[in-house]
């Protein structure tokens, strides 16, 4: 340990030149904000097209798996992590003298603004962060100009839904739609019993990622006869998970998909 510590870079608060991100959400914020050649490595999840909006762009960077040994060998002058990123790795890197900055998950658009601004400050790219925030605010203003009407439920694998305190709920609120989870007393993430979903009878149902190529118990809620009967008369909306797993300007895409579905329903096109 002493030998490794001796090789670690000195801690510095100046603009970093070799940055490693080890969390999907910080990966994407860093890719959006970092200067050319400033970002060296992103996590392996950044290259997953099912989880990452910037999967194609991630191919330009070295991939890491959140292991202290591999990150040490990259010799970064800044490591960016999420507050839930592997705690052992984060603690070890700090003990070795590396500068580690942690970002909390976004649960609303204020959090997105704050994380964009902080990433811009850390990377010395404040102007880029200001431009991204301005684009985000313009998109939100456009959504607010003509709010949609109706109710919606998120119904994912294992019957999970999201309520107040989640990023998905914040997205729903920006469209003008009502999330039935709030009326059912569900905060954050929680189980939505099928009976409650059917009784609530929302105008729209976001079913999330549904894959039936391989059998999975997590998908059994979609196979239930009662859900199948409900789905035949419900308006299902497909919002790829990657658009609201992390908070960023691209989170607006989830809101736009949802609002477009609500508009089609209002126009009687569904």
Image (cartoon, grey):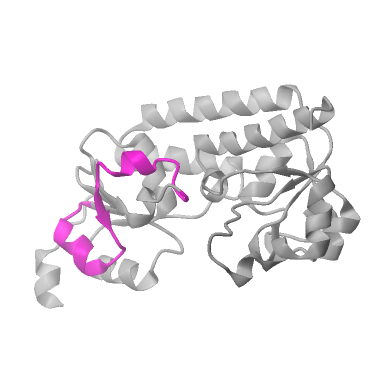
| Quarter of the picture holding the N terminus | bottom left
The image quarter in which residue 86 lies: bottom left
* Vertical arrangement, residue 218 with respect to residue 1, above or below: above
Magenta residue check for 55: yes
* Horizontal side, residue 205 vs residue 101: left or right: right
* Horizontal side, residue 139 vs residue 6: left or right: right
Q: Furthest-right residue in view?
A: 199
| Quarter of the picture holding the C terminus | top right
For the point 84% across and 27% down, the residue is 268
* Vertical arrangement, residue 186 with respect to residue 78, above or below: below
* Horizontal side, residue 40 vs residue 118: left or right: left
Highlighted range, magenta: 50-77
Q: Furthest-bottom residue in view?
A: 1
* Vertical arrangement, residue 117 with respect to residue 8, above or below: above
Pick the front one: 163 or 239: 239
* Residue 231 in picture, x, y percent from top left: 79, 51
For the point 67% across and 54% down, the residue is 165
For the point 84% across and 38% down, the residue is 150
* Residue 222 in picture, x, y percent from top left: 71, 61
Q: Furthest-front residue in view?
A: 213
Magenta residue check for 200: no
Count of labels in the image: 0
For the point 79% across and 59% down, the residue is 227
Pick the front one: 51 or 17: 51
Pick the front one: 74 or 244: 244
The image quarter in which residue 178 lies: top right
- Residue 9 at least partly seen: no
* Residue 60 in picture, x, y percent from top left: 25, 41
* Horizontal side, residue 26 vs residue 269: left or right: left
- Residue 131 at least partly seen: yes
* Residue 258 in picture, x, y percent from top left: 69, 37
* Vertical arrangement, residue 47 with respect to residue 190, above or below: above
């Amino acid at each position: 340990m002493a030998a490794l510590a001796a090789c670690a870079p000195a801690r510095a608060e100046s603009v970093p030149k070799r940055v490693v991100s080890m969390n999907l959400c910080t990966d994407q914020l860093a890719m959006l904000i970092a200067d050319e050649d400033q970002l060296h490595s992103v996590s392996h999840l950044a290259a997953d097209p099912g989880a990452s909006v910037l999967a194609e762009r991630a191919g330009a960077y070295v991939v890491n798996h959140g292991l202290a040994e591999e990150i040490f060998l990259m010799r970064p002058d800044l490591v960016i992590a999420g507050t839930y990123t592997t705690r052992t790795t984060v603690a070890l890197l700090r003990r070795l003298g590396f500068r580690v900055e942690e970002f909390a998950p976004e649960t609303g658009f204020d959090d997105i603004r704050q994380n964009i601004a902080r990433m811009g400050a850390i990377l010395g790219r404040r102007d880029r962060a200001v431009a991204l925030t301005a684009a985000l605010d313009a998109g939100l203003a456009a959504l607010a100009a003509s709010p949609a009407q109706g109710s919606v439920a998120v119904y994912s694998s294992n019957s999970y839904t999201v309520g107040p305190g989640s990023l998905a709920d914040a997205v729903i609120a920006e469209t003008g739609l009502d999330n039935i989870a709030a009326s059912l007393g569900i905060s954050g993430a929680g189980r939505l019993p099928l009976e409650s979903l059917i009784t609530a009878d929302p105008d729209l149902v976001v079913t999330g990622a549904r894959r039936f190529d391989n059998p999975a118990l997590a998908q059994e809620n979609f196979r239930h006869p009662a859900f199948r009967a409900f789905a035949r008369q419900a308006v299902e909306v497909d919002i790829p998970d990657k658009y609201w797993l992390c908070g960023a300007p691209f989170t607006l895409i989830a809101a736009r998909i949802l609002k477009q579905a609500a508009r089609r329903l209002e126009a009687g096109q569904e």
